[in-house]
Image (tube, rainbow, N blue to C red):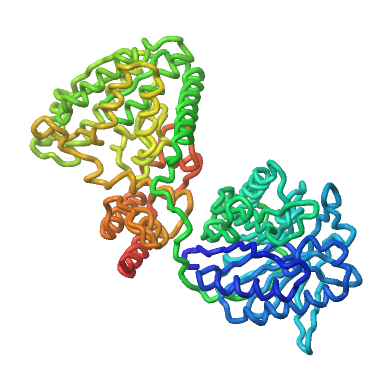
């Protein structure tokens, strides 16, 4: 449960129709076993203590009293387990019969959730037996052998005392299928976890629709949604029950299994409830309406991430088809953004500084696509190569080949003489290869691009990407500046895939060959002289690997995670999984700490550059535009974040 993770189990044991005592024993046994495996929320199906397909047996006094006995049995025999349990049973209150989900923790029933939407269509005939909940929360007392338990029955939120972000509530089967599910109100009332105890039968196509409902409701309510369906043992007189189980988080399915189709009567996932809470705080349209709360407690322990996959590249879909779709969409969005700016500004040319690297290659490709739409030709796309001290034969050759293959106009402006004159003007030695030596070149290049744009009535298309903006890896008023930054919302790990996708889909072999060569070239600003004709300055040797930085960027900016959690997730994704899996990413614990600390240091210190960025299209869920998603004072300090990171590193046990 550390860092907001909690292990959840949805279990469909074989039910014995009307044998309440046998079902209670099975539920206790399965709950105890799941708790030993680390599950802290354990969910069973609708009417799991007696069976859903009982028909008129629901009206038998013997069955109802047996269910009360079973509830006490489950509560008493799970008193010492560190978990909260949800079971289903009928209960008679005020001469009416309700189909309820009971929440049990610490040896007592803490709440009951009556079913609101009672179906009587098709194969269902529940209104023959059950009364729909009228929205009025009642206090209910059950007694057995001189022992009583009192609890609320209605729309309440169960809150864990030691883990304030762990709040849960329940609804039952049909409640999810209606236009206004009770879970929507329960989420607004503060429930981060919604449990659905269900007995939905299987017909062709229903499981797909059910999956869509679970996913969409977890996304709409910004919650963890646990669906547990009835299965084996239910009467098959007129229907078949498949034991479908799903666990979703914020619109994403974490785990899924079917008793009928997969032979699985249990599914386990580790949900990040802390992330759910953080996302609700971020979304100010989430209308919170606090309701009645009841309390339980669990012992806070670390949840090992043995069932949760942490992607090493959160910006890049692992599925090839999904990755291609994303690349196509992003290229379209970049192009449309630039097209709109071109039309509004009435520009006559597009000016792109082309270096032979990934970012400028992507920007030039987007500029050409925009030119096709606006002008019907690419002759007014001006690709400017500006060789200087660090330019290598390979990068210059790639820049020239790509420009010619795309059909853009190529201009070469050698800036060595201008930079040397500038060194003389400011009294800087050419042999002193410091930040002034490097930045003078970057600023001269930007001056050239801006003035060419002025001269031709054009617009300078910026090439810098999202990862560089996060790290401040740009020269202030140098490559930091443009008139429209088409790559500003694209992280470096995705830039390479975009370039590669364009290469494979452009239908031009010369363009493809040039782009593939660019993809295979080390990332470098080329501001220091080459060694033996090869690139001497490799960006990732200086600021760190972009694969890791993009992982950190996503979890810091998009998820808002604390440094200790970011470090833990990075270790899990890049070094060693908490189930013992070797991630084989080539990183050590020391590497993760070093580059994560470097990220925080640079991210805070370089905000002043992001505070005055040019316009650029937002294409994903993370952007650092000061006018859109990210507002941060330039003078904030990173000390608190870096101190926590250091403590997490020192406490980490291999």
Left or right: 477, with 152 as reference point: left
Quadrant location of residue 134? bottom right
Q: How many marks?
A: 0
Is residue 559 in sight in this rendering? yes
Q: Position of residue 360 (x, y in %)?
A: 32, 27
Q: Is residue 385 above or below residue 53?
A: above
Q: Residue furthest bottom?
A: 146
Residue located 83% across and 47% down the image: 122
Q: Is residue 259 above or below residue 361?
A: below
Residue located 24% across and 22% down the image: 398
Q: Position of residue 52 (x, y in %)?
A: 77, 61
Q: Is residue 121 above or below residue 356?
A: below
Camera-side residue of 121 and 601: 121
Residue located 64% across and 65% down the image: 13
Left or right: 139, with 571 as reference point: right
Q: Is residue 576 above or below residue 526?
A: below
């Amino acid at each position: 449960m550390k860092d907001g993770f909690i292990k959840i189990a949805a279990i469909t044991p074989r039910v014995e129709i009307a044998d309440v005592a046998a079902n209670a024993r099975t539920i206790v046994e399965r709950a105890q076993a799941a708790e030993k495996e680390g599950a802290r929320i354990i969910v069973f199906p609708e009417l799991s203590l007696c069976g859903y397909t009982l028909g008129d047996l629901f009206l038998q006094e013997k069955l109802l009293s047996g269910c009360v006995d079973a509830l006490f049995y489950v509560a008493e025999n799970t008193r010492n387990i560190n978990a909260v349990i949800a079971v289903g049973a009928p209960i008679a209150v005020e001469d009416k019969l309700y189909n309820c989900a009971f929440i049990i923790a610490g040896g007592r029933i803490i709440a009951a959730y009556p079913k609101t939407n009672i179906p009587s269509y098709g194969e269902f005939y529940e209104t023959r037996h059950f009364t729909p909940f009228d929205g009025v929360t009642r206090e209910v007392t059950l007694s057995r052998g001189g022992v009583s338990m009192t609890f609320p029955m209605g729309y309440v939120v169960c809150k864990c005392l030691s883990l304030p972000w762990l709040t849960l509530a329940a609804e039952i089967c049909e409640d999810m299928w209606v236009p206004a599910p009770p879970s929507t109100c329960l989420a607004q009332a503060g429930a981060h976890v919604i449990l659905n105890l269900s007995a939905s039968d299987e017909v062709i196509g229903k499981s797909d629709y059910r999956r869509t409902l679970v996913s969409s409701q977890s996304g709409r309510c910004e919650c963890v949604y646990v669906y547990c369906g009835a299965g084996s043992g239910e009467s098959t007189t007129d229907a078949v029950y498949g034991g479908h189980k799903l666990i979703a988080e914020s619109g994403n399915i974490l785990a899924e299994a079917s008793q009928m189709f997969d032979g699985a009567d249990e599914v386990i996932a580790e949900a990040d409830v802390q992330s759910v809470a953080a996302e609700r705080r971020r979304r100010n349209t989430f209308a919170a309406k606090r309701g009645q709360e009841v309390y339980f407690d669990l012992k806070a322990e670390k949840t090992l991430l043995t069932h949760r996959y942490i992607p090493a590249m959160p910006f890049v879909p692992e599925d090839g088809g999904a990755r291609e779709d994303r690349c196509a969409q992003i290229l379209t969005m970049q192009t449309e953004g630039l097209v709109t700016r071109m039309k509004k500004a009435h520009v006559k040319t597009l000016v792109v500084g082309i270096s032979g690297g990934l970012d400028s290659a992507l920007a030039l490709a987007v500029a050409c696509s925009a030119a096709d739409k606006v002008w019907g030709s690419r002759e007014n796309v001006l690709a400017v190569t500006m060789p200087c001290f660090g330019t290598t034969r390979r990068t210059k050759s790639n820049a020239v080949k790509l420009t010619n293959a795309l059909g853009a106009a190529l201009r070469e402006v050698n800036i060595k003489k201008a930079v040397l004159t500038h060194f003389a003007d400011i009294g800087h030695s050419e042999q002193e290869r410091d930040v002034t030596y490097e930045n003078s070149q970057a600023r001269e290049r930007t001056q050239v691009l801006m003035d060419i744009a002025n001269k031709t009535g054009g617009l300078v298309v910026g090439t810098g990407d999202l990862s560089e903006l996060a790290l401040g890896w740009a020269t202030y008023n140098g490559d930091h500046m443009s008139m429209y930054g088409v790559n500003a919302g694209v992280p470096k790990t995705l830039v390479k895939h975009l370039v590669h996708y364009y290469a494979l889909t452009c239908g031009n072999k010369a363009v493809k060959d040039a782009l593939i060569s660019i993809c295979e070239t080390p990332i470098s600003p080329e501001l220091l002289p080459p060694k033996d004709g090869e690139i001497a300055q490799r960006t990732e040797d200086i600021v760190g690997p972009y694969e890791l930085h993009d992982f950190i960027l996503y979890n810091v900016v998009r998820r808002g995670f604390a440094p200790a959690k970011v470090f833990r997730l990075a270790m899990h994704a890049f070094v060693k999984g908490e189930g013992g899996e070797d991630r084989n990413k080539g990183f050590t614990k020391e590497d993760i700490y070093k580059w994560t600390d470097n990220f925080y240091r640079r991210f805070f210190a370089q905000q002043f550059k992001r505070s005055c960025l040019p316009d650029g299209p937002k294409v994903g869920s993370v952007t650092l535009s000061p006018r859109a998603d990210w507002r941060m004072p330039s003078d904030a300090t990173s000390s608190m974040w870096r101190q926590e990171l250091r403590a997490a590193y020192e406490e980490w046990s291999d």
